[in-house]
Image (spheres, coloured by chain):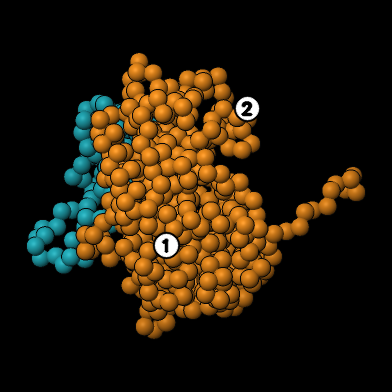
Amino acid sequence: MPDQLPEHPDWLWRTPDPKPSYDVVVVGAGGHGLATAYYLARNHGITNVAVLERGWLAGGNMARNTTIIRSNYLCEESAAIYEHALKLWEGLPEELEYDFLFSQRGVLNLAHTLQDVREGTRRVGANRLGGVDAEWLDPDEVRAFCPIVNTSPNVRYPVLGATLQPRAGIAKHDHVAWALARKADAYGVDLIQNCEVTGFVQDRDGRVVGVETTRGRIAAGRVALAAAGHTSTLTDLLGLRLPIQSHPLQALVSELLEPVHPTVVMSNHVHVYVSQAHKGELVMGAGIDSYNGYGQRGSFHQIEHQMAAALELFPIFARAHVLRTWGGIVDVTPDASPIIGPTPVANLFVNCGWGTGGFKATPASGWVYADTIAHGRPHPLAAPFALERFTTGALIDEHGAAAVAH
Amino acid sequence: MLLIACPWCGERDETEFHYGGQAHVAYPPDPEALTDAEWGEYLFVRANPKGEFAERWVHGAGCRRWFNVVRHTVTHDITAVYAAGQQPEDRNGVTA
Ligand SMILES: Cc1cc2nc3c(=O)[nH]c(=O)nc-3n(C[C@H](O)[C@H](O)[C@H](O)COP(=O)(O)OP(=O)(O)OC[C@H]3O[C@@H](n4cnc5c(N)ncnc54)[C@H](O)[C@@H]3O)c2cc1C
Ligand SMILES: [Zn+2]
């Protein structure tokens, strides 16, 4: 029998043993950790880098998200960093020499109440002033752009309009991770899976000089956390408390269907967001489970709720079957914005708090974080997202800005 | 779906409750005396353990009372339920 099996395909990256010491140790091989390592090498020539991953590469939120990419956030600071990401996405398939199915099919954010309409039109104005493509569509235009949306006035929450960002879209998340991993590896970055960071090594002055791992002690010039929902379990070890709460966030896919859904539709009000993957699955998600949780699973009533919302918006889905549901662990901050930058602990950097919406930021997150680590000070796009904002009160309140989810 | 034992109503589905986050976070006795960093920490920072967590729930669709629960954040096992105002260690005699 074995002679009938095909050859194993070429590996996209090496599987090295950890070296005793690196200039930079990145903790977490999700999208953000991999993008950070890639840009450390590409933009800053720092290649003596390890990415340590407790499980397998992209086994966390990176390959569990619903892959929505957009930059139509209300606050200037957010729009700036997400738009930087979107511009990078536009060049990344070519740069990484990997077609990861980046598809700019547009995102509709539906409005169902007068307040939604005011929020949406305001956000379109803010986006245009900030150089982010944005349009306001009335219900007829919504129907023309996405014919399967139910725009009938005879539903509980009729569609009153929508914002459209034409350059937004989706990409295939696991391929994005592999594309970044392959290029980082080619620069000489060591990607080390099954290697959990369990502690920190500090010198007499409290500076972090290495990490303890399940594969032994590894010395590091700088340690950069990119551990998403697990970040505070690590910083707790140093007595550094972060304003993060880890919650389950679930998603689901249908069986494979003919292409019926041309774009991405998000509705904060009835609360569901839906796209159709290239393979044909309808991909949908909604809100976090209310309680803190690290179990990568949530409660079924969340799934029921998002299915009810999906059916109200898309009656055509009534006969579709759910194939699979799953959960990730998202790191939520009080203002729904990330925390990026140096910390009070010397040589320790954090990049976390992306919560339910960090996939779209992957390239920019890596870009600004690599720059921050390389220079030991915040990149200008990252500066507003420093930990200090929870002392100064200069929050970037995307929770209040409504366009926040995912 | 969690099954939560309200101290007054007994076991009910999670959908009858709302979550209130970490329990036993006392309002600072003298807020004016705090530094900005201490005040920010009181406002924004809560424990986020992977393991046992003392947290608050309110039985919104039942008796509408707040109470405390000790729940494991990975397994979701609930090992204690006790009244608001009580500490986990003096929960003896409270329905769990
Ligand atoms: C269901 C769901 C839907 C989502 N939908 C969207 C969406 O549509 N659009 C969007 O923009 N965002 C979305 N997100 C959010 C997005 O997935 C995250 O914000 C983003 O993936 C976080 O960055 P990451 O990829 O680096 O995280 P992760 O992939 O979670 O990477 C963190 C890594 O750190 C590792 N790690 C943790 N602790 C340790 C340790 N001690 N030692 C070593 N390694 C460790 C973990 O194993 C993990 O691999 C969604 C998330 C979920 C769960
Ligand atoms: Zn009750």
Residue at 48% from the left image edge and 29% from the top image edge: A146
Alpha carbon distance from label 1 to label 2: 39 Å
Element at label 1: strand
Q: Which chain is orange?
A: A
Which color was chain B given?
A: cyan
**Quadrant containing the N terminus of chain A in the rendered view:** top right
Q: Position of residue A396 (x, y in %)?
A: 29, 55
Residue at x-position 58% and y-position 75%: A47
Dot label at residue A351:
1
Q: In the picture, which quadrant includes the C terminus of chain A?
A: top left
Q: Give amino acid for label 2.
A: Glu
Residue found 56% across the figure and 76% down from its top: A45
The disc label shown at residue A258, or none: 2
Name the kind of residue labelled 1 in the image: Asn
Instruction: Give the mark, 1 or 2, whose residue is nearer the N terminus.
Output: 2
- Residue at the bottom extreme, as displayed: A204
The secondary structure type at the circle numbered 2 is loop
Would you place residue A204 above or below residue A292 in this image? below
Residue occupying image coordinates x 64% and y 66%: A185
Taking depth in this image into account, of A123 and A219 the one nearest to the observer is A123
x and y, in percent, of residue A123 in the image: 31, 44
Q: Is residue A371 above or below residue A389?
A: below
Q: Quadrant of residue B82?
A: top left
Q: Is residue A2 visible?
A: yes
- What chain letter is assigned to the residue under label 2? A
Classify residue A25 as left or right of residue A339. right
The reply to whether residue A238 is visible in this rendering is: no
